[in-house]
Amino acid sequence: MTSTGLSAISSQAAANRLLLRRKRAERRFQLYGILAISAAVGFLIVFLASIVSRGYMGFVQTEVQLTVNFDAELIEAGSYRKILRTSLVELFPEAGSSRAERRALAGMVSAGTVFVLRETVEADPAIVGTVQDVWVLASDPVDQFYKGRIDAALPEGERPISDASLARIAGLEEAGRIALRFNRNFFSRGDSRNPEEAGILGAIVGSALALVVTLVVSFPIGVMTAVYLEAFAPRNRITRLIEININNLAAVPSIVFGLLGLAVFLNLFGLPRSAPVSGGLVLSLMTLPTIIISSRAAIRAVPPSFAEAAMGLGASRVQAIFHHVLPAAAPGTLTGAIIGMAQALGETAPLLMMGMVAFVVEVPGGFTDPSTVLPAQVYLWADSPERGFAEKTAAAIIVLLGFLLVMNGLAVYLRRKFEKQW
Amino acid sequence: MHNRLVAAVFVACAAVAAAGAAQARDQINIVGSSTVYPFATVVAETFGRGSDFKTPKIEATGSGGGLKLFCAGLGTDHPDITNASRRMKSSELEKCRENGVMDVVEIKIGYDGIVIANAKAAPEVQFTLRHLFLALAKQVPEGNQEGGQLVDNPNQAWSDVDPSLPDVAIEVLGPPPTSGTRDAFNELAIEGGCKTFPGLKTIKKEDKNRYKAICRGIREDGAYIEAGENDNLIVQKLAENPNAFGVFGFSFLDQNRDAVKGASIDGVAPEFENIATRAYPVSRPLYFYVKKAHVDVIPGIREYIAAFTSDDAWGDEGYLTDRGLIPLPTDERAQFGDNAVNLIPLESL
């Protein structure tokens, strides 16, 4: 430290080196950040691309045009099977009359076609005795082939569709009697074991009913808990214990709530199994901590001057809270509730214990009807052997994602619209 | 105003709950095996659409879980029918009777084959039960020979098991222990191979638990990979990895013949006819059980059973065979069809 000039130069150089190092470190850090984000975005893109590429075909369905003779005598006798067979034979006159050939013919269209014909007649009795062109659903193998999911180049025994069927499809194509059409059934029906007929309406309604129960139970309880804890409760050991427990509850695995629901709601209270009311109650237990925590944060964010000013003008504590603090905290509270609901919408594990992962064909009409929910429907379809369910699974995921997007969008919108700057 | 609203909401909730609990049920409740689920649901749907009854509700709870729910008691809170991919155990029947479920009607509906398959592009292999035991058991006789000391399974490649098999690492994707398919695979395939060693077979008489541990224990060193309950997933993974084999139900092989192929076992290919004639060694019976006391109380049970046991459904060319169910031989079908009509309860097991 004797030669000040030298040491000044060297310390200057050292400082520069240090500066360069710091700048490099900063750039490196930014690079890590960008890498992390691109990894996350990459995963999202891969996920969405795989779901959409598999699922978009689920929204269309191959249909075949039959010329059906609604013979009055046969309808009287209820032999819709015979009516269908006659129109199939008419469409493919080259087919023999052996049992195997007839089965192969029947295998061209959906197994539910017989019922569809009956429903058509019931809906419009005027068509009895007439000949009509009717578009009916193709069977799953025909549908999958027409959508290009089955390789025709494989030897016959190795693909789920026979050479004879391929020839028939080619004939239909020439006659313009086969086409991809919008899959109405998907949005208007409940579950089915025929992938071409399976719909998601039952699961959508089931999810909606369960969420109504969840909202009605958890929102008032959650908000009241938050209000009491924030505005009224004394700060002591007991309230701190309650707070810690609520925070812990938010991290409890959801299956635990399912077990609790099974023991309490089903076995003790005797609520119906597989019903939205019991499922909704379990989901509300799960959602409560989310609502309480976000409501408390929202209430805490309202400046104390609001309540103080109101009370200074003679308002009671309750009036100050309900007239001034809660409305100001509403955007945060609602956002928390919607995010809680979105979580509940995507939940399957607790509902498994409540019997909501079930095969339910009829669209539920009330809170006690057996029903299933969207994610449970995804789970059930993903596990089905029929080929067509793969795209139905992906399509159901798209619908589920759509609902989640709408709900989260609503939360953002509410926050933007009502949020005030203090 | 707020208070009144909250109160009203709670009253409404309580009313809904009470109404639900008190309501009589007009829909059949079915629980049980996920292997029978694809068949039972097809029958239920056809039954629901073709009749004035509501479509039965079916839950896939697994065979054991279903029997537990089924035997929990009588009344509308409990299921009417349970599906099972194995026969009811006598302990389960006792449990049923303890809880007041005295009369249980057993109906065998057909068979299911369990296949071991690999990718279409992979070479064809022929297994024996002994191969499967030596490749997948936790402990095998040293040197893969009769009389060898039991050692932790040292076989790393299929060719270690038998020179006729390909020289690739043993990698088998299969169901987890909670699955009925796994139970059946352990019992029929692994134990079947174990029994080909007379020395191991004799252990059964001496120490039943030890025998079970040896002859049904699957290795846990990574050669057998538990791939979850989803058979579709196993099929997808096989298509991507030609060296891996997968264990799953016959209907998944049937639906995915363009992606995977089944290996023959003891010289018998996993084909429809071979399973039906019981020549294929790894197949198991499927059942459903009906609570007799619920018949005529819950509307439609009798008709549902009739629909299930109609020739249209479980017959040799019924619609269930299209879904991969292997039909019963004619005499068994006649016997259980008779059971179904007259609702003859199980005496004992």
Image: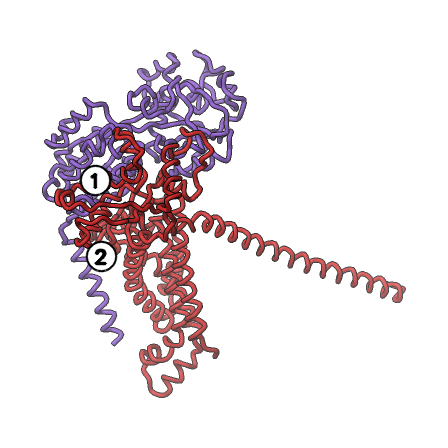
Chain colours: A red, B purple
Measure the C-alpha gap from mark 2 to mark 1.
Answer: 31 Å
Image: B13 above or below B73: below
Question: Could you tell which of marks 2 and 1 lies nearer the N-terminus?
Answer: 1
Amino acid under disc 2: Gly
Name the side, left or right, on which B166 lies relative to A5: left
Q: Of A164 and A354, which appears nearest the observer?
A: A164
Name the side, left or right, on which A47 lies relative to A283: right
Q: Of B253 and A417, which appears nearest the observer?
A: B253
What residue sits 52% from the left and 50% below the top? A46
- Residue B177 seen in the figure: no
What residue sits 65% from the left and 56% below the top? A31
Kindly identify which residue carries mark 2: A365
Amino acid under disc 1: Arg
Instruction: Tell me where residue B108 sits by quadrant.
Output: top left
Image: B249 above or below A365: above
Which chain's residue wears label 2?
A: A
Q: Which mark is residue A81?
A: 1
Q: Of A92 and A267, which appears nearest the observer?
A: A92
What residue sits 38% from the left and 27% below the top? B115
Name the side, left or right, on which A229 lies relative to B111: right
Q: Position of residue A269 (x, y in %)?
A: 20, 53
